[in-house]
Image (cartoon, helix red, strand yellow):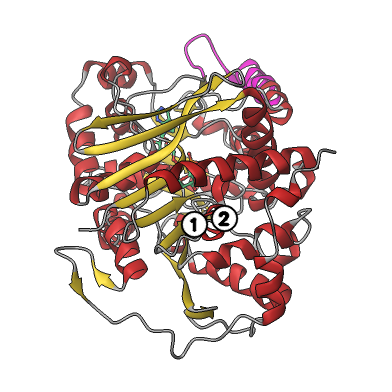
Amino acid sequence: MARVFIISNRVAVPNPDRGVHAGGLEVALKATLRRHDCVWLGWSGEVKPEGETQTRTVEAGGVTYIVTDLTEEDYEEYYNGFANRVLWPILHYRLDLAEFTRRDLTGYLRVNEHFAAELDNVLEPDDLVWVHDYHLLPLAKALRQRGRHNRIGFFLHIPMPPPEILTAMPNHERLIPALLHYDLVGFQTDGDSQNFARYLASECGMPAHIPRRIGVDDRTMRVGAFPVGIETREFTRRARRAVRSEFVRSVRASVPGALMLGVDRLDYTKGITLRLDAFERFLMANPKWHGKVSFAQITPKSRSAIHEYAQMEREIDTAAGRINGTYGDVSWTPLRYVNRPYTRTALAGLYRLARVGIVTPLRDGMNLVAKEYVAAQDSTDPGVLILSRFVGAAAEFEDALIVNPYDPEAVGAAICRALEMPLEERVERHRKLYEALCDNDIRHWGDRFLTELTGYDMTGSLRPNSPREASGGISVPARIRRRSAGFSMTASHHHS
Ligand code: ADQ
């Protein structure tokens, strides 16, 4: 049976010494790792001086992990540089925060070449390759240039902005058409797929209305939405158990009145500053709630080495101090702002305890916190989810209180509405949200993607599903094939 190669920037090698902290990607891929013969390849997380980097193979739990170190230059140019200072802000619609240098782009392409070379050493012709996220956009192209004809799929975990934004990225014409080298490109939502199709129409001369299959040379490329979900019932059970824990009981005892909860990595896309602004406006407009609601914002720090992140940390600290200074009392702290990670179980318990879950990113591919919050509720007395319209989850969660995160007064009003919502309405909204969650359980996500990638039903044995044919597709115009095929990695190794 064909092996499935999973390629991502970071690799979640199980490590008993560090305790289990399952990241979103690992949870999403759990069923795939269990059911298929998988090899997971990516960065080890270690940065070594030039000449001391290594690639290691580790076997654990039936999965082969191949991890490779980065040099300091790689880390700065590829990871901190092009991936997190250019692609991350631009794909989240933040052109104003992008800091492009050719040097970083060169580093980005070099690391993609390095991953392709490592993969090339071990890949068999019938192996499937599934590449994850914005760090590795040109990986299929690098593999094709090595003569590889394997089925290669790509999934973007973060948003795909419209071409009006994407075309402002320097060198977009070298990177985005490189996605045509994949056999399947998956996005979180239909909106993201449509944005990609619009880019192909405006920049690559494709027809405006893209069919699901596009003929590229002798291959067929497909584009589709594969919204990421969670293990819904498992998370519900975990939350039910967790509320009985010592930790959650002590939190409950320490909160006078209702708890509102926000859980996000500290990132400017998550809209935390505006969220605090909304909470402040809510407090200003609703003295009757003083002393009766506490807002816990749990926000582990990330990427502090990047200037914008350090600046945002300071802004949030200032706002938090101001809110507690203005409204707090010796017996009541309106805002509890915490910078540490919690275990999944502790988080599940906190979600269940919270009368309001507030998820207001300015832009987010999916947002699993919104899904975890809904899964964790007691269906007979559920809390209310306040959800930004600009996250992927909003497409499935119409029954949340949908808000515009850029409008703090409206978000403040939604906080009040959520706190005062009658039981009957809470139960009804939660029932519909929970149904939406169960319709899209993460256990089927990997199989859906792999089935679409191969044309075979990957849920059981490898049975033919539909023959793979290029008929009915359209051809990529020759000029794009040339441009795309003529994009040479080595030619781009000039320093700025
Ligand atoms: P992220 O931007 O990391 O993921 P998100 O989807 O919210 O965002 O996932 C965060 C995960 O980290 C959740 O499972 C959450 O429980 C956990 N987490 C957050 N704070 C924590 C804390 N203090 N302690 C412990 N765990 C914590 C990217 C995209 C998203 C997309 C996912 C998956 O940006 O839009 O949903 O990938 O595709």
Q: Ligand 1 near label 2 (Cβ, under 8 Å)? A: yes
Q: In the image as oriented, which residue stretches furthest toward the bottom?
A: 472
Tell whether 263 sits left or right of 342. right
112 or 390: nearer the viewer: 112
Query: In the figure, residue 399 lies in which quadrant?
Result: bottom left
- Residue 194: % across, % down: 57, 72
- Residue 225: % across, % down: 44, 66
- Residue at image location 31% in from the left, 56% down from the top: 446
| Residue 166 appears in the rendering | no
Residue 159's disc number? 2
Query: In the figure, residue 161 lies in which quadrant?
Result: bottom right
Disc 1 residue type (three-letter): Gly
Tell whether 128 sits left or right of 161. left
Q: Ligand 1 near label 1 (Cβ, under 8 Å)? A: yes
Q: Specify the segment rendered in magenta.
A: 315-336
- Residue at image location 66% in from the left, 67% down from the top: 484
**For numbered disc 2, what is the local secondary structure?**
loop
Query: In the figure, residue 447 lies in which quadrant?
Result: bottom left
- Residue at image location 31% in from the left, 17% down from the top: 253
Q: Is residue 290 magenta?
A: no
277 or 348: nearer the viewer: 348
